[in-house]
Amino acid sequence: MQKLKEKEKAPGTYPISVRRGDTTSNAMPFLVDTLSERLDREPNNSARNAQRVKTPIIIDGRIDQAGDWDVFRLEGRAGEKIVAEVYARRMDSPLDSVLRMTDASGRQLAFNDDHEDKGSGLDMHHADSMIMASLPAKGSYFLFIGDAQQKGGQEYSCRLRISAPRPDYDLRVVPATINAIGGTAIPLTVYALRKDGFSGDIAINLKNAPKGFVLDGAVVPSGQDKIRLTLTVPQQVLSEAICEPSAPRNRT
């Protein structure tokens, strides 16, 4: 098994492969997180035998037969916000997940089939589910995860994150690479992929830019997910400039 490098131990998704002799397998995505993890424990297919979990946590499991549901019970407080997010298609699993949350009486509080993930939607057709709910009262709550097509099997694996919101963002810059003549101004579009309800301003700066590079309009305003800005290139280009969010991030 391939070992992760030190820099790859930060939260994120990394490709790993298995090598046996002179043969190396195809790379598979491997998700790294800072939360504690537990395995799905059967039987837990109804509220009566739901697996008790304590948040924050990641549960590694699978929908191992057609029509199966995995159910998890957690305790919450009035006003507490809970995020439940499935990683399945993003990890090359065939699972087309469905998530729903109920209170102890069975009343449904939240439901999601396909959550729009602008960062990887073209790869997995938004088939992973995510819900974010504010709990109405102190008590027990139940999370149900299943397959939208009522399918299952050993390959229908998933990771379920249950935690408080972790506001964050990723950025995408279009075009991703620039070839420019010195002295010109290049239009850019920056897309902000906001996560877990993050809605603050995002300031963007040039990193290690040689003298003469100027970035205009480099703030993604609160609540917006796209801006147009201009990169002015000096007459004599000395080295590359990289556009990235400033530090520290504003997550108010």
Image (spheres, grey):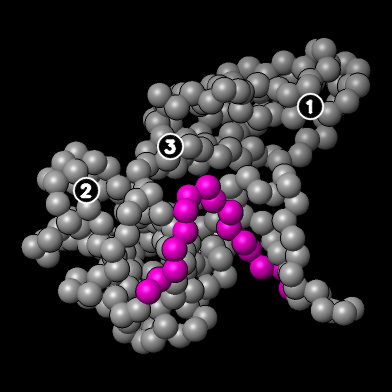
Single out the mark in the foreground, 2 or 3: 2
**101 displayed left or right of 175:** left
Asked whether residue 36 is drawn in magenta, I would say yes
| Residue carrying label 3 | 167
Is disc 2 surrounded by few (<14), some (14 to 19) or many (20+) residues within 10 Å? some
Q: Position of residue 245 (x, y in %)?
A: 61, 28
Q: CA distance from mark 1 to mark 3?
A: 28 Å
Single out the mark in the foreground, 1 or 2: 2
Say whether disc 1 or disc 2 marks the residue closer to the N-terminus. 2
Say whether disc 1 or disc 3 marks the residue closer to the N-terminus. 3
Q: Residue furthest top?
A: 211
Q: Return the mark for residue 227.
A: none
Q: Which quadrant holds residue 240?
A: top right
Is residue 72 placed above or below 151 in the rendered structure?
above
In the foreground, 22 or 230 = 22
Q: Label 2: state its secondary structure.
A: strand
Q: Amino acid at mark 2?
A: Gly
Is disc 1 surrounded by few (<14), some (14 to 19) or many (20+) residues within 10 Å? some
Q: Which residues are magenta?
A: 26-41
| Residue carrying label 2 | 76
Q: Label 1: state its secondary structure.
A: loop
Q: Amino acid at mark 1?
A: Ala
Asked whether disc 1 touches disc 3, contact meaning CB atoms under 8 Å apart, the reply is: no
Asked whether residue 86 is drawn in magenta, I would say no
Q: Position of residue 250 (x, y in %)?
A: 49, 23
Q: CA distance from mark 1 to mark 2?
A: 47 Å
Q: Label 3: state its secondary structure.
A: loop
Q: Amino acid at mark 3?
A: Pro
**102 displayed left or right of 177:** left
Say whether disc 2 or disc 3 marks the residue closer to the N-terminus. 2
| Residue carrying label 1 | 241
In the foreground, 18 or 27 = 18
